[in-house]
Image (tube, rainbow, N blue to C red):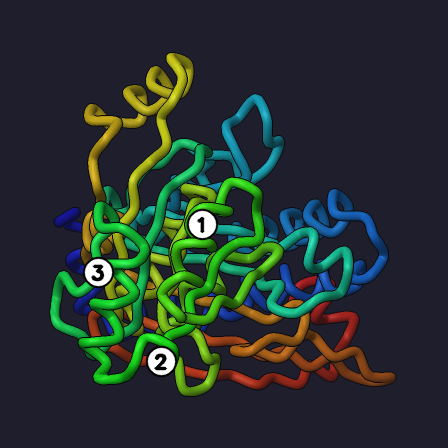
Amino acid sequence: MNEQVRLAKRDPGLDRILTLELVRVTERAAVAAARLRGRGDEMAADQAAVDAMRKELNRLAIDGTVVIGEGERDEAPMLYIGEIVGTKKGPKVDIALDPLEGTTICAKNLPNALAVIAIAEQGTLLYAPDVYMAKIAIGPGYPTGVVDLDASPEENIRALAKAKGCPVNEITACILDRPRHAKIIEAVRNTGAAIRLIGDGDVAGVIHTTEPDETGIDIYMGTGGAPEGVLAAAALRCIGGQMQGRLIIDTDEKRERSLKMGIADPNKKFDMTEMARGDVLFAATGVTDGNMLAGVKFGRDSIQTHTVVMRSSSGTVRWIKAKHQDLDKFDDAR
């Protein structure tokens, strides 16, 4: 373990810096994006969240490297993969982030848009290119290996129902509503299981498997973004569950990018602990109302936010409802 991180872990101030302080980062991004929700401008909402998150990250006492970000340097002017953030006077950490998870959701003011970030010890988050990833995830409480990325959708649904002790028709799968998922959707429906189709926001979709009694979602499956996969794995490391992912490396250009990021085997099946190892911190603030988090509420004299922040080493999950009354201070320097 990096010596600076090891020493910092002994310092109780690390909790304050890298858990409660993370809340400020996602709150700021969520509020910035929420000001533009329902306006139909995905790019403007995303840029507002990016700018706000970067500004707040640079106040943190960390020497952070963005390993999952808005894209590679030539494509993203801020919060690109490889960007260094923080005051550079604290522990060295990896950062995975999505300042606005669900840009289309926010633009249409639909449920489950989030501002999301994960921080872990240096070298412990998967350094993944911005490609697709095949994913499968379930919540906590099941034996290891109940579901598997290489099994068929039918096999996974039936295995999960058996482990849960319920008929197949009481299982609900969350799947992104995309043409590429037509065969998966047909296969799941043929088992008698239900499907919750989502238009965007697969980080939230994966996290929803951890509380099926509240969300109605038992399993997530399908292909989505690799960056979102790493963020979802970080959340599950904290809150519990199982997840597997495989990068979709189907061109020479993608293979070359993957090799540069240290991924030698393009067909490797990553489990949750390989995508997010060590001590992991995760925070998400609601931008729009959702199953898990309420969206930002703008009042005449205050702003209300709803955030979840988690830590893997302690298993602590904090739900924070905040009321910000000094609006100028909130928007400027906090």
Amino acid bearing label 2 = Val
Q: Position of residue 331 (x, y in %)?
A: 73, 65
Q: Position of residue 303 (x, y in %)?
A: 73, 79
Circle 1 SS class:
helix
Whether residue 16 is visible to the viewer of this picture, yes or no, is no
Question: Are circles 1 and 2 on residues that touch, CB within 8 Å?
Answer: no
Amino acid bearing label 3 = Val
Q: Is residue 81 above or below residue 44?
A: above
Residue furthest top in the image: 252
Amino acid bearing label 1 = Glu
Q: Which residue is mark 3?
A: 147
| Badge 1 or badge 2: first in the primary sequence | 1
Between the C-alphas of marks 3 and 1, the distance is: 20 Å
Q: Which residue is mark 1?
A: 228
Between the C-alphas of marks 1 and 2, the distance is: 20 Å
Circle 2 SS class:
strand
> Mark 1 against mark 2, which lies toward the viewer?
1
Q: Is residue 278 left or right of residue 157?
A: left
| Badge 3 or badge 2: first in the primary sequence | 3
> Mark 3 against mark 2, which lies toward the viewer?
3
Q: Position of residue 104 (x, y in %)?
A: 70, 52
Q: Mark 2 packing: few (<14 Cα in 10 Å), some, or many (20+)? A: some
Q: Position of residue 205 (x, y in %)?
A: 47, 64
